[in-house]
Amino acid sequence: MPLNTKDLREYRRDGKYMTPEQRMKLLKPYLPSPKPRTSAQRAEAKAREKKSRLGVRRFLRTQLHVLVFTIIHAFFSLYIRLRHAYHAVVNQIFSFLHHHHRTPELIQGDVKDLRRLPHHVSVILTIEDHGMGGAGLERLVNEAADIAAWCASAGIPELSIYEKTGILKGYISDTQRAMSQKLAGYFGPNYPSLSIRAPHIPAIETPASPHAVRGDGQGPKGLSVMLLSAEDGRDSIVDLTKTLTEMSQRSKLSTADISTELIDAELSESIMGEPDLLILFGPHVELSGYPPWQIRLTEIFHLQDNHRVGYRVFYRALVRYAQAQMRMGSADNAAAAGACPTWEPLAKREMTVFRPPIIRSGANALNRALFLKKVTIAAAAVNDNKNISKWRKELSATRKLIYAERISPIASHPDKTLAAQGRKCLLLGVDVKAEAPETWGPELEDGVRKEELAVMPYELQLDYDYWSYQDVMTSVLPEEFHGEIPTGFNTAGHVAHLNLREQYLPYKKLVAEVLLDKNPAIKTVINKVDNVGAESQFRTFQYEVLGGPGDLQVQVTENNCVFEFDYAKVYWNSKLETEHRRLVELFKPGEVVCDVMAGIGPFAVPAGKRGVFVWANDMNPESYKYLKQGVEKNKVTKFVRPFCEDGCTFIHKAADSVLNASEKGEYASVPQKRPFKSKPNTPAPKPIHVPIPPTISHFVMNLPATAIEFLGHYRGLYVGRESLFSPATSAKLPMIHVHCFSYKLDDDTPLKDICERITKYLGVTMSPGDPEQENCVAVHNVRDVAPAKRMFCASFRLPREVAFAPRS
């Protein structure tokens, strides 16, 4: 391969280069001498040269090649287009017939007729940022939350999510919060429990809603989620192999016991068990470093020409799995794997057996030692560790293994001597009795007959660490308080913020202590003792520390932005993250947004990252301080300007300030990156100058208690400046987004109430409708804040009769 000038200089550092003649002279002694050609060969070469002088044959041959290539290319192009069109039509039909509408009942209706469902589903997701400023991570978390909601709705208890880089592990708290919110959005007040963990990372648990726990054993099943990355694949195999080698060298493990079955058992216990179904959401089968050991007998599904995560792919994967036949070497096993196992009653019985002990030890006393519970079950001791994987699959296929959350079916041998030698056993379901062979089933009997298994009693010890938050609180609280056990709380960094009902106040210290134990990311628990916004104009509240240190200086990551603040001095609500993102995505780069009640910047800072100019104001000096810090920390000073003023006067002042900045020619200078694969000496491209437009495109007022009362201050916002807007220009009057509270009703009562209040303070009759239409209001449901109260966001275009009215 020829070398360029740079390569030559690297190759010859003395700067002296050989000419082609010198190189040939140097190499000639080492080259074989050319064979002399006969006269016949020379004559043939001359004739061939003479015949091809005109090049007619060469031309015809070239044209033939072009023709053949064109025909093949046209054929395959037509085939690909037809295939894409066919799959697009089929996918649309599936989407129409099987759309979940965020309703678990519809998903359950889709899967109820399937012959069987997987117990463990695994998916491969990829993060695609492409310079979107972190939007790829947000999309990845949302996709993971959607899949978790689908699994919970379908009754699938285990989900593992593989993402090659492991970024979800770094944002496990955010992922857990997104999944919890998604489950609450699907199930409402009856959301199931959620446990999310990663290898070598403690689980974060969200207890089920008290309404979801019913005495008849019905209700949504809990969901266990495992996050995986490339380091859990081949690297884990290598690490385990090294460990086993060291144990063998130190005579702690016999070399005869090191087998593929042992490695399988250890990897299943430390990483995860083999999933029943692996779903790929790409158009090709690309495992991207997925743990190879765990998918030897897994059904792998992908949809051709699909490029995104969607429910139709998930549903079609379940259909394919239900139709697949798992043949494992014998007719009995094949029949068992192909049949739909009726293990629901077994699961309910095991849930009954593994209930926590009842402990009524006093309001503020938590004795963890009392939570020790010993359960005698049956175990199948494996006489040779090489057979662990084989028997685990066979017993799992017939549902003879134990089915309980957070309990691995592989355990050490009950005999301590054999356990010290590395011997293992398989824990069996509660229906299997060691002393009653008639309960074993043909698989266990066959294993015992072959002397590969030995069924024996096993004492399973469950201590305080095993029980979930819901389990512990059910044990310690009186039965009359089980209906509404405190489960929901706001989080800000390491702080959990409770709002306990009066009947639970005597148990507040106990609640805090259990929350700290079961949520490793939480370090401090506080309880609100007054109403936000009622006693403080800055929406701060009085609180008491229930557990942990009183340090409320927290750091929060939201929408790819980092915020640091004192939770006691400013207002923050993590439950509004979706609303923050929704509004920010409405803003276009280069527009101007005025955030009248900005707080510490949950709207302003992410908007600044999108290249949106923001005039951000908050009357609270502490909020203003942390707003400035957030602007600097997230490097959006070119786009976000913080203010600390009264919102009533800031509305007009912001409009005047933006116009003044535009008339002065102010702009934001955005540096550009070097083109990919550009030469090192290529000068950096010139920065792009983004000018500030003369008008504000959006106003945001996130003060639900009183924001509507500020609408009267928009009168005369652009009086005398009619030429800045249509029809003189393409600019429209600003869109107003005002947050407010109203009734929690499903009819049009909240819409009418909000429109009437807007009409009262704006002085113009407003009605529900498309906000782009004159005097119409679009009302978005944000969240429920109380049993009878809901938070909304009303959006409308500022009427001309208000914007151009005389200023008062």
Image (tube, rainbow, N blue to C red):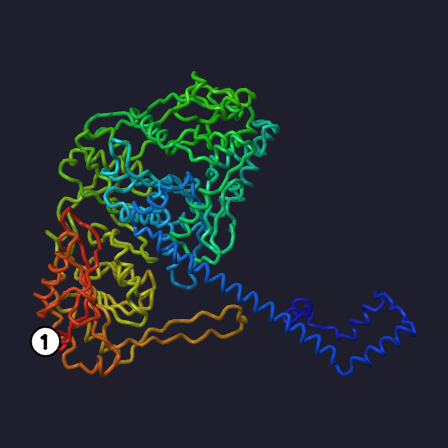
Where 537 falls versus 457 (above or below)? below
Residue 22 in percent (x, y) is at 79, 73
- At 56% from the left edge and 31% from the top edge, which residue is drawn? 247
Q: Nearer the viewer, residue 177 or 23?
A: 177
Q: Is residue 262 left or right of residue 173?
A: right
Residue 695 in percent (x, y) is at 23, 75
Q: Quadrant of the N terminus?
A: bottom right
Q: Residue furthest top?
A: 435
Q: Nearer the viewer, residue 673 or 85?
A: 85
- At 47% from the left edge and 53% from the top edge, which residue is drawn? 303
Q: Nearer the viewer, residue 496 or 722?
A: 722
Residue 423 in percent (x, y) is at 52, 25
Secondary structure beneath label 1: loop
Residue for badge 1 = 807
Q: Quadrant of residue 724?
A: bottom left
Q: Quadrant of residue 654?
A: bottom left
The type of residue carrying mark 1 is: Arg
Q: Nearer the viewer, residue 101 or 731?
A: 101
Q: How many marks?
A: 1
Q: Is residue 509 left or right of residue 520?
A: left
Where 12 falls versus 785 (above or below)? below
Q: Quadrant of residue 195?
A: top left
Residue 762 in percent (x, y) is at 10, 68
Q: Quadrant of the C terminus?
A: bottom left
Q: Is residue 642 left or right of residue 289?
A: left
Q: Is residue 386 left or right of residue 317?
A: right
Q: Answer few, some or many: residues within 10 Å of disc 1's Cα (few below 14, many 20 plus, some between 14 and 19).
A: some
